[in-house]
Image (tube, helix red, strand yellow):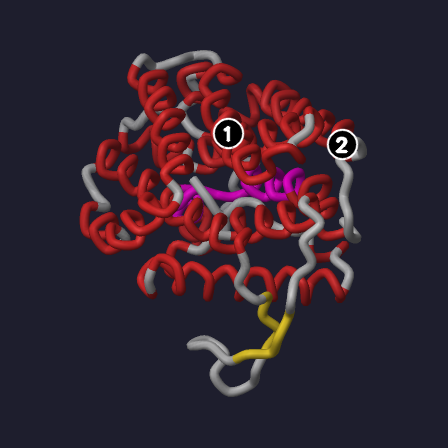
Amino acid sequence: MFGYIRPYMPYVYQKDNILYKAFYCGLCKSIGKSCGFRARMSLSYDMTFLTAFLHNIKNIDVQMKKERCVLHWIVPHPVIQDDAIMQYVAATNIILTYYKLQDDIVDENKGKFKQSFFKKGYQQAKKKYPKIEETVAKYMQILHTLEREKCSSIDRIADPFGCLVREIIALNLEDKMSNAIAKVAYNIGKWIYLIDALDDYDKDIQRQNYNPFYIAYMAKNKRELLQNYGEDINFIFGNIFSENALYIGQIEFYFNHDLTDNIILRGLPMQTQTVMQKLSKIEKKEQKLAMKAGIEIEK
């Protein structure tokens, strides 16, 4: 369910690219420090964005140093130093990962080993930040209930994860939380749930897992879904993007917000297009066979 929130690289300034990578590496080290080395494997791009977003809104400057790590052990590279926000996001990251793996166990009867791999880090995060765990548990339970009921409303099924992201941000921002931030956070949460569902459309059908787009449209595969209901899908995501564009201008940022603007206003739409154009494993196999036979597959 995670890892979709990324910058749109063709429009990222060099300074912001360095900053983004430094946040990513800094968060990785923070996760290891607060939740254990194993927990570092759960790091996602979504949490990297959240780290940059919270620092900017809370007016907390970052310290950057060149350091080595397991992946960059020869040449030191810029790393954002650990602080309270990093630790908060690190805990959020491992708790969300633990619940994501719980979903995999329920839906596909797999992931028990992975979940046990992250259990120690999850318990450490839960102990230090009980409100994060309570918030995640609350909205994931609501989400699971709607999924078991095979909710056919796309807006309703995406609501719990939107609320979850909004509340996680509100817990950290406290009195700095505003209506505009709440709107953007909620929309990002909805987008994460829906883009993951669209990306997993064919896999969910094959494994007979719940998928909101399938319940709503009953298309036999993602290709048919987009061919027959592409306008509806674009409208759903378009509403999210238009609201983000409206409210992000009302958020008070203390530093240069080129990076977060790029991610929210360009990265999310482009990632959506990427997922829409992405071929399933079955389609890739069919395409390879057709290319060998010299046959053009109908788009």
Position of residue 166 measured from the top left corner of the image (x, y, whole percent): 55, 30
Quadrant placement of the C terminus: top right
Mark 1 or 2: the one toward you: 2
Q: Is residue 212 left or right of residue 111?
A: right
Could you tell me which residue is drawn at 31 percent across and 12 percent down?
149
- Give the mark, 1 or 2, whose residue is nearer the N terminus: 1
Q: Is residue 135 left or right of residue 180?
A: left
Residue 236 figure quarter: top right
Vertical comparison of 131 with 116: above or below:
above
Question: Which residue is label 1 attached to?
Answer: 194
For badge 2, the amino acid type reads Ala
Q: In what element is the residue under mark 1?
A: helix
Question: Circle 2 is placed at which residue position?
Answer: 245
Which residues are the magenta region? 268-286
Q: Residue at x 36, y 28 (%)?
A: 140
* Residue 137 falls in image quadrant: top left
